[in-house]
Image (spheres, grey):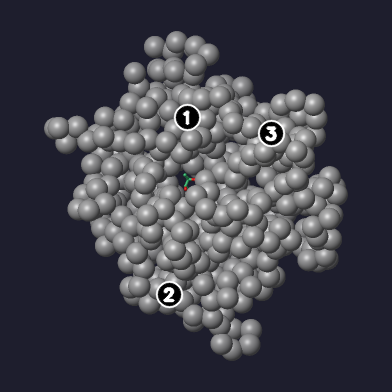
Amino acid sequence: MNAGTSDYRDSGLVFPEGFTFGSATASYQVEGAAQEDGRTPSIWDTFSKTPGKVWNGDTGDVATDHYHRLESDLDLMKDLGLGAYRFSIAWPRIQPQPSTGSGAGSAVNQAGIDFYSRLVDGLLERGIRPVATLYHWDLPQYLEDAGGWPMRATADAFERYAEVMGSALGDRVHTWTTLNEPWCSAYLGYGQGGHAPGRGEPAAALAAVHHLNLAHGRAVQALRATSTGDPDYSVTLNFHVLRGRGDGAAEAMRRIDGLANRAFTGPMLRGEYPVDLLEDTASVTDWSFVEDGDLATIAQPIDVLGVNYYSTATVRMWDGVSPRQQNDGHKASGDGTAWPGSDKAVEFVQQPGPYTAMGWNIAPEGLEELLLSLKAQFPDQPLMVTENGAAFDDVVADNGSVPDPERLDYLRRHFTAAHRAMEQGVDLRGYFVWSLLDNFEWGYGYAKRFGIVRVDFDSLERTVKDSGKWYALLAKTGVLPE
Ligand code: FCB
């Protein structure tokens, strides 16, 4: 029963009626079929095929083969009792070629639309709500060739893509999410270089921040204009929950909070960039890419804010002399900086364990704290945990089952944390476990397993892990199981 202990290992907690229990994936991580039905390369195809960028040379060419296993994966979701499925749409399946005519959008690839239409219908037939993300990092390569997210034209292109998707699926999608974790797209993609397209240009990273923000606002407008159903609108951010050390801890935390969190919540939820962020980055850029009217466009009302949370980060001011540590989230390669303007000011400190297989510390109290802090900052903004989960090195038992007690424990502790935040008044609408399936974990390829369902990457066979069975019980009863 509810132990109420400080280690967050409760059971018996009851989630409110209507709370959404979901699970999440992303197109490049699960679909495979990279060259089929008209899809052209994204920046992740190019990046993963560049030697040294992804562990073991892994690519998303086959991934979990979800594209071909759609029906059985949908059945699996139903068996797990999921109330919602968060997936992303591969932009290069929808608009595989650059636009040719002036003003006209790229030609739309009907086969790409058809796949997602089948996915949405298959979910609805099974009573599962479709939560669709437009951008989970697979930018069409032709847009990167034209300059990528540092260019304003990429936000223009995103608006046209959003119109296409709103028209195609806006009668059936339950929740639209514009972007997944623009922090990663901008800073890991263009500053630190450990994510596609692998550039190490601090000024370009900040231009990417702005054009991603702009793309979000433009996409909400376009989706609203074209969706004929009554969908919710959202964006998903990966918040950095910070701890500080040493003299100047508050300053170190302020700087990283500005770059990681407020660079997005500022324009999206308050219609302004934080003044201290502009000051901290003044030596890198003058932000002249922000044009009149942009901030009003970005600050579209959203129905729900997506929150991705895995662990905390500890920072302190760097003395300028001792060997410096940089924690850049999930990078496997890349040696630029994810912290333009603060890379020589702040260092990241190894945090106390225990850790997951990613080396990320396990800190459920950070989730409770984050949800409470968002409520304090944005009191009227409903929230949804759009990703939380853990990688561990699973072992298949002799009987074929996959006992994964550490992942189960991780999930129990984080659901407990979310429940405690709700008891303190946080308007949390749902929770999506990352991930439904073991999949292509970006720079780590297939070496890191996040799934509540195991995928054998040779046979592509699926096996529900113990954590998946536990989650199914939670999803079906709304009560945190023993
Ligand atoms: C998040 C990503 C997701 C997955 C998890 C582990 O940052 O959105 O695709 O890689 O981390």
Say which of 472 and 40 sits in front: 40
Specify whether 431 is left or right of 185.
Answer: left
- Image location of residue 453, percent across then percent down: 30, 41
Q: Which mark is residue 355?
A: 1
Q: Which mark is residue 257?
A: none
- Disc 2 from disc 3: Cα separation: 41 Å
Q: Say what amino acid the circle numbered 2 marks.
A: Thr
Which residue is denoted by mark 3 in the rendering? Answer: 315
For the point 30% across and 36% down, the residue is 394
For the point 84% across and 54% down, the residue is 282
Which residue is denoted by mark 2 in the rendering? Answer: 40
For the point 56% across and 87% down, the residue is 100
Q: Say what amino acid the circle numbered 1 marks.
A: Tyr
For the point 82% across and 48% down, the residue is 280
- Image location of residue 152, percent across then percent down: 70, 70
Q: Say what amino acid the circle numbered 3 marks.
A: Val
Circle 1 SS class: loop
- Disc 3 from disc 1: Cα separation: 18 Å
Crowding around mark 1 (Cα neighbors within 10 Å: few <14, some 14 to 19, many 20+) is some
Say which of 210 and 73 sits in front: 210
